[in-house]
């Protein structure tokens, strides 16, 4: 069984993220913190989630993102049964880009 990280330890990283000031600083922070494959996976999942929110079909998402059907299914499950934050952030990001 995987060992759970104490909540206090996890919160430090998220607090640090809130102090990022620019998009460039955010990119640099995550490039320093994550392996390239981890970043690519997160970026792919976010793109998949955005496409799912736009009611794109799995085949179109697979073609555009190279995500597996299993990844698309997992992201879809999180959009439907997760905390709801991912969908909120996607909506907020799209709204900000319209302005």
Image (tube, rainbow, N blue to C red):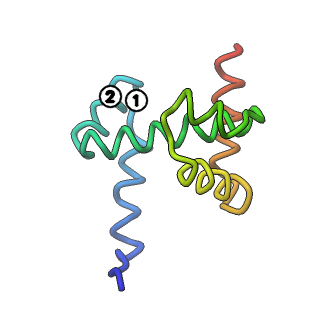
User: Counting other residues with Cα less than 10 Å from the Cα at mark 2, is it few (<14), some (14-19), or many (20 or more)?
Assistant: few
Q: Local crowd at mark 1 within 10 Å, few (<14), some, or many (≥20)?
A: few
In the picture, residue 30 is in which quadrant? top left
Q: Residue furthest top?
A: 99
Image point 68% across, 33% down: which residue?
92
Give how far across and how far down residue 72 sits, in percent: 59, 48
Report the side of 36 relative to 43 (left or right). left
Q: Quadrant of the N terminus?
A: bottom left
Location of residue 9 in the rendering, given as x and y in whole percent from the top left corner = 33, 68
At horizontal 55% and vertical 54% (from top left) the residue drawn is: 70
Mark 2 — residue? 25
Q: Where residue 90 appears, x then y in whole percent?
A: 65, 36
Camera-nearest label, 2 or 1: 2
Q: Who's the residue at 45% across and 37% down the image?
A: 43
Left or right of 68 in this view: 60? right
Camera-side residue: 32 or 17? 32
- Left or right of 94 on screen, residue 62: left
Q: Are marks 2 and 1 in contact (CB under 8 Å)?
A: yes
Under tag 1, what secondary structure?
Answer: loop
Q: Residue furthest bottom?
A: 1
The quarter in which the C terminus is drawn is top right
In the image, 17 versus 49, the foreground residue is 49
Above-or-below relation of 60 to 96: below
Cα distance between the residues tagged 2 and 1: 7 Å
Question: Relative to residue 4, is residue 32 depicted above or below?
Answer: above
> Which quadrant would residue 73 be assigned to in this image?
bottom right
Q: Residue at x 33, y 46 (%)?
A: 38
Identify whether 18 is placed above or below 73.
above
Mark 1 = which residue?
A: 21
């Amino acid at each position: 069984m995987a060992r759970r990280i104490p909540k206090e330890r996890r919160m430090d990283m998220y607090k640090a993220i809130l102090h990022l000031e620019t998009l460039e600083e955010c990119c640099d922070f995550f490039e320093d913190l994550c392996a390239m494959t981890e970043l690519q996976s997160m970026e792919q999942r976010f793109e998949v989630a955005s496409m799912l929110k736009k009611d794109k079909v799995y085949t179109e998402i697979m073609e555009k993102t190279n995500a597996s059907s299993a990844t698309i299914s997992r992201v879809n499950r999180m959009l439907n049964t997760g905390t709801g934050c991912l969908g909120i952030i996607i909506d907020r990001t799209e709204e900000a880009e319209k302005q």
